Image (cartoon, rainbow, N blue to C red):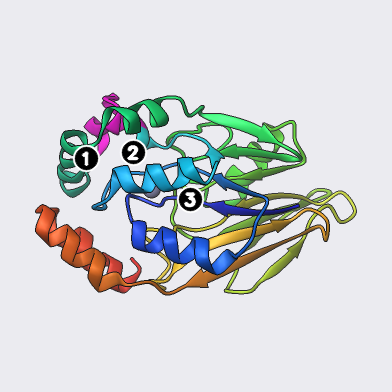
Amino acid sequence: MRIAVISDVHSNLHALDAVLAHVGSVDAIWHLGDIVGYGPEPDAVVDRLATAGAIGVRGNHDSAACGGNEIDWFNAEARAAMEWTRRVISPSTVAWLTALPARREEADFTLVHGSPLDPIWEYLTTTAAARDNIAAISTVHGLNGHTHVPMAFSLDGDRMGRIAPSEGRTIELELDGHRLLLNPGSVGQPRDGDPRASYLILDLAARHAQWGRVAYDIDAVRAQMRAAGLPFRLSERLRHGF
Ligand code: ZN
């Protein structure tokens, strides 16, 4: 079974379509939330994922789009984009986002947006936090997003390691009791200095995970954002991958 794991699409249909074309034929699409927010095409992104049968979890932007008070914690630009998102999204998009759980378990993996301990908000960036969070899941491995930076934490016995995986990096699954927390990075707004869309492929037969990147038409998205009146800095950061 070959699974595409994606996160933080953020209403960026050009980036999502580039990823879906790049991964080719997969048996499932798992998403880790923040489907909407920031970007210009929330309904089209939800429609694409729903049509593809993607399953996943809710992020802080998804909750805010459905009326949640997460918006109170957003900075000025995120808030402006969220107010725009709330005005334009369709009832069926709201229904699809509202139905997303905060966490779910699939095969050997727990899926969350932020972290297993705080699925909506925690930014999982340190080995100490990763240790606590691996202890909090009952599956072997965990998948999380939210930071917009590809990342892997590996617990081997008592040793916790951290890897910033580059494009094409492969990690073996379940070697001698290794437990992993894997972050695919962001499809629609990467923040690791590489503006290309980021994703992760899980190959459950070969027992490995591999990160991928793909370029997309950033200028087309920036033009859409300009036309929609979305904050300039949000479109500008897509060019820099930050
Ligand atoms: Zn996000």
* Image-based side of 175 in relation to 188, left or right: right
Name the disc covering residue 7, or none. 3
Q: Is mark 3 within 8 Å of ligand 1?
A: yes
What type is the residue that disc 2 sits on? His
Q: Which residues are magenta?
A: 63-74
Name the disc covering residue 85, or none. 1
Can you give x and y, in whole percent of width and height, for residue 98 in the image? Answer: 40, 25
Judge whether residue 125 is colored magenta. no
Q: Is residue 109 above or below residue 183?
A: above
Can you give x and y, in whole percent of width and height, for residue 216 in the image? Answer: 38, 71
The CA span between labels 1 and 3 is 18 Å
* Image-based side of 61 in relation to 118, left or right: left
**Residue at the image position 46 percent from the left and 45 percent from the top:** 49
Q: Which residue is mark 2?
A: 61
**Residue at the image position 42 percent from the left and 48 percent from the top:** 48
Q: Is residue 67 above or below residue 175?
A: above
Q: Quadrant of the C terminus?
A: bottom left
Q: Is mark 2 within 8 Å of ligand 1?
A: yes
Q: Quadrant of residue 76?
A: top left
What crowding class fits label 3: few (fewer than 14 Cα within 10 Å), some (14-19), or many (20 or more)?
A: many
User: Helix, strand or loop at disc 3?
Assistant: loop
Cβ–Cβ under 8 Å for marks 2 and 1: yes
